Amino acid sequence: MSQETLSGWARKLRAREISSRELTQLYLDRIERLDPQLNSFITVTAESALAQADAADARLADGEQTPLLGVPVAQKDIFCTEGVRTSCGSRMLDPFVSPYDATVVERMNAAGAVMLGKTNMDEFAMGSSNETSFYGPVRNPWDTERVPGGSSGGSAAAVGARLVPGATGTDTGGSIRQPAAFCGITGLKPTYGRVSRYGMIAFASSLDQGGPMAATAEDCGLMLNAMAGFDQRDSTSVERPAEDFTAGLDQDLKGLRIGLPKEFFAEGLDEKVRGVIDAAVDVLKGRGAEIREVSLPNSHLSVPAYYVVAPAECSSNLARFDGVRYGHRCENPEDLMDLYTRSRGEGFGDEVKRRIMVGTYVLSAGYYDAYYLKAQKVRRIIADDFRSVFEDVDVLLAPTTPELPFALGAKADPVSMYLSDIYTIAANLAGLPAMSLPAGEIDGLPVGLQLIGNYFDEARLLGVAHQYQQETDWHTRVPAAFA
Amino acid sequence: MSVEASEVQRIAHLARLAMDDEKAREFAGGLSDIFDFVEQLDGAPIEGVEPMAHPLDAEQRLRPDAVTEPDNREGFQAIAPAVEGGLYLVPRVIE
């Protein structure tokens, strides 16, 4: 039963083969029974989920055909949900019950999706292992001694273990794709500006982008149809006509030009992972794609540029948490400075403090040119590399991560953790759409394949992924303990 | 670049983060590693390159100067740590 995909359930709901209430209860039961092993949810909203399910059933009875109507989903706890705690994985926001809905939540509610709860995440989305959450680490359903990736680790683990058919994520430097790869699911980071950031708690505003995480490319397309769209309330939202992201699913791959950026296959890539990616390339070649090697000569500068730009923006964004208007406030402050420093000192965890400090330093008087300005210039040459490559190819293909899911506690020093996003960050810096899909298994652990597309080419990416998923069954695999 | 604990304290103060000496020493190593790591940008071929502020080089969108949001003052203040008479409370700032 739980093996069914989000799209499959959507069809069954519309055919009235199952009610939304039955389906919602099925997943709520799975969460209650299985999530203690994973810790993928921070908050489960059983009561409101059943009420939403009943409302969806009434709409279905009226013959409404909206694709997500009655389908259970989970929201990453970075998206504000009215009347429901929105913690962002932080002690700072542990007491925060949002007074409004994020645009993504509002749109998914309007589409009739049923929210089962809020998923665990790295604190303020800063992390690649989901170990920085105030609510404790999330565990990987394929091996509970290993991390699920981060920062959208709760969403990835929950979908991987089929505790929910689809969940939202956000991706600032790889936070949808890397956990999708580690948990054996499909996840898409859209073009910057596609999905509204309104009510999505800000980390690095020029990079943050929300997107879908689910079992298949088709599922992700259905979710993105509900999530994406222009929003007046997000100043960087792109004004484009509504698009059907499932429109390219059945497009064959004949003549599709796929580029393999050689820098993403260089030293540092696990040989077994390379083998999996090579096999995936052969599958796509077999379906008519043309493969060529390309170069992104400045991609090695992505991670260092990111660790200037992202902390700088984070230090600015997180200045709003002052213990005055919402969130954690220290006991008995002596004066205003004490109120600020102790509320922030107590409310933020170490990784968040580290990034705030890096950002504060690089933006402090006299250092702006040496760090932030330089990083923004590097960002342009990285984006320009992509522009020139996309004159010759339609899609780029690479591993999502250089290695398999690692053990909890394995990456204690910050820089080694940062390097786990070495293949994902460049797409964020350039603002390009990119996705990860399951492409193999090594020693019982999933391996992710990354596709990077040109601006606004999500439908094509999902099409390539869907074609791959017609010929392979990696996306159908569920860890034995959760089958 | 080696960051000393005293420098960590200075940055923490700028960032309004309470930090004791032990914690500052603990952060010093990680911050030094990060600043060493980002020094890789030093050799980047960026002469004459315009800094990139937005991936699509979008311009700031303008909207008519009209009220669009409803008043939700009570809702917003209901989640504040300390309010009184519609005001946010903070420690005394004027002696």
Image: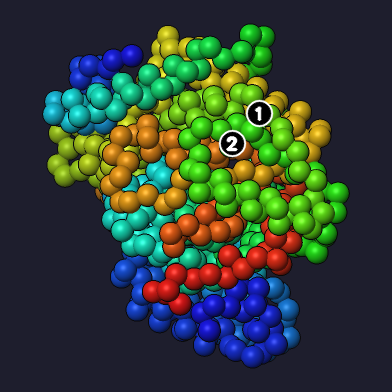
Res. A335 visible in picture: no
Which residue is nearer to you in this view: A360 or A39? A39
- Residue lying at 37% horizontally and 35% vertically, measured from the top left: A416
The foreground one among A220 and A412 is: A412
Q: Which residue is mark 1?
A: A296
Looking at the picture, tell me which residue is in the foreground, A51 or A162. A162
User: Relative to A36, does residue A459 appear above or below in the rendering?
Assistant: above
Query: Dividing the picture into quarters, in which one does residue A322 lie?
Result: top left
Amino acid on which disc 1 is placed: Leu
Q: Position of residue A142 (x, y in %)?
A: 41, 64
- Disc number for residue A24: none
Pointer 2 indicates a residue of which chain?
A
Quadrant of the rendering where the C terminus of chain B is positioned: top left
Q: Residue at x 62, y 79 (%)?
A: A9
Q: Amino acid at mark 2?
A: Phe
Q: Say above or below: A404 vs A419.
A: below
Q: Position of residue A51 (x, y in %)?
A: 50, 81
Name the spot of residue A17 as percent of width and height, x first: 64, 91
SS assignment at label 1: loop
The residue where tag 2 is placed is A264
User: Few, some or many C-alpha atoms within 10 Å of disc 1 (few <14, some 14-19, many ≥20)?
Assistant: many
Establish if A224 lies above or below A307. Answer: below
Q: Quadrant of residue A324?
A: top left
Colour mapping: rainbow
Residue B31's spot in the image, x, y percent? 31, 25
Residue at position x 67%, y 44% in the image: A397
Mark 1–mark 2 Cα distance, whole angstroms, equals 9 Å
